[in-house]
Every structure is written in structure tokens, then in C-alpha cells.
Amino acid sequence: MANSKSALKRIKIAERNRVRNKTYKSAVRTLMKKYFEAVEDYARQPSPESLQDVKNRMSAAYSKIDKAVKRGVLHSNNGSRKKSRLVKQLKKVQAQLNPPAAETSTAETTEAS
């Protein structure tokens, strides 16, 4: 156990910060998990409503990640990596749903007309 008043105070502060950081990290993980579930639902049944749900969940996750970075709970690179994972997952699903069309054949047919 600590022997000085300052050491006792530091222990209290460290515990307070640990609890606060834990709530932020837990909220970030929860929002990311909900986002990934929404993306899976969108992949299974693509619709404008499910895409809007995905975007709303992404916005909420972005907001919480940015707040955690601002408060020093997450390092800025860690926050950027988490946001990158979110976008990457959505782009992967959208690429599967909308494969790139052959642009050359479309361009040739419009020029021939």
C-alpha cells in the first residue's frame, strides 16, 4: 500500500481514469460490433433502408472513436485504424454487390450509335 498522501491520490486518479477509459473502449467496441452486424444484414438483403442503417451506425461509431481519441483514451493512429476497418468492410460488401461493369464495351456501343 502507498505510504504518502500523493501516492494515495495518484492511486485514486489512476482508478478513476481506468474506469472512464474502460467505458469509452467498451462503447467503441459495442458500436463497431453493431456496425459490422448492420453491414452483414445489408450484404444479405441490400436495400436503401439497410444502407441508411449502416451509415447511421458508421456515424455513431466514428463519433465515439473521435471522442475517445480527443479524450486520450485511444491513440490517434488506433482511432484511424478502427475507422479504416469500418469503411473497408462496407466497400468490400458494396464491391461484391455491384461488380464493376466492363466500361469499354459500354463506351464502344454509345460511340457506334
Image: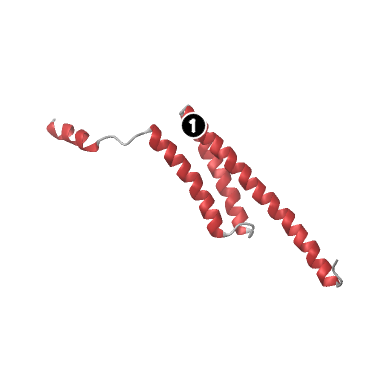
Q: Is residue 64 above or below residue 99?
A: below
Horizontal arrangement in the rendering, residue 47 relative to residue 73 (left or right): left
Q: Is residue 112 above or below residue 61?
A: above
On the rendered structure, is 100 left or right of 58?
left
- Determine the residue positioned at 12% across, 32% down: 112
Q: Position of residue 99 (x, y in %)?
A: 34, 34
Residue on which disc 1 sits = 42
Q: Secondary structure at mark 1?
A: helix
Instruction: Looking at the picture, tell me which residue is in the foreground, 59 or 44.
Output: 44
Label 1 environment density (alpha carbons within 10 Å; few <14, some 14–19, many ≥20): many
Q: How many marks?
A: 1
Give the residue displayed 62% in from the left and 45% down from the top.
Answer: 29
Above or below 32: residue 79 = below
- Give the residue at the far front of this rendering: 1
Q: Single out the residue that lies furthest toward the left.
A: 112
Residue 38 location (% of width, % of height) = 54, 34
* Residue shown at the point (63%, 60%) measured from the top left: 72
Q: Is residue 93 above or below residue 10?
A: above
- The image quadrant of residue 20 is bottom right
Q: Residue at x 14, y 35 (%)?
A: 111
Residue sitting nearer the eye, 42 or 66: 42
Residue 63: where, in percent of width, then height? 58, 49
Image quarter hosting the N terminus: bottom right
Give the x, y percent position of residue 58. Answer: 53, 42
Pick whichever, 24 or 89, lies toward us: 89
Residue type, mark 1 in image: Tyr
Which corner quadrant holds the C terminus?
Answer: top left
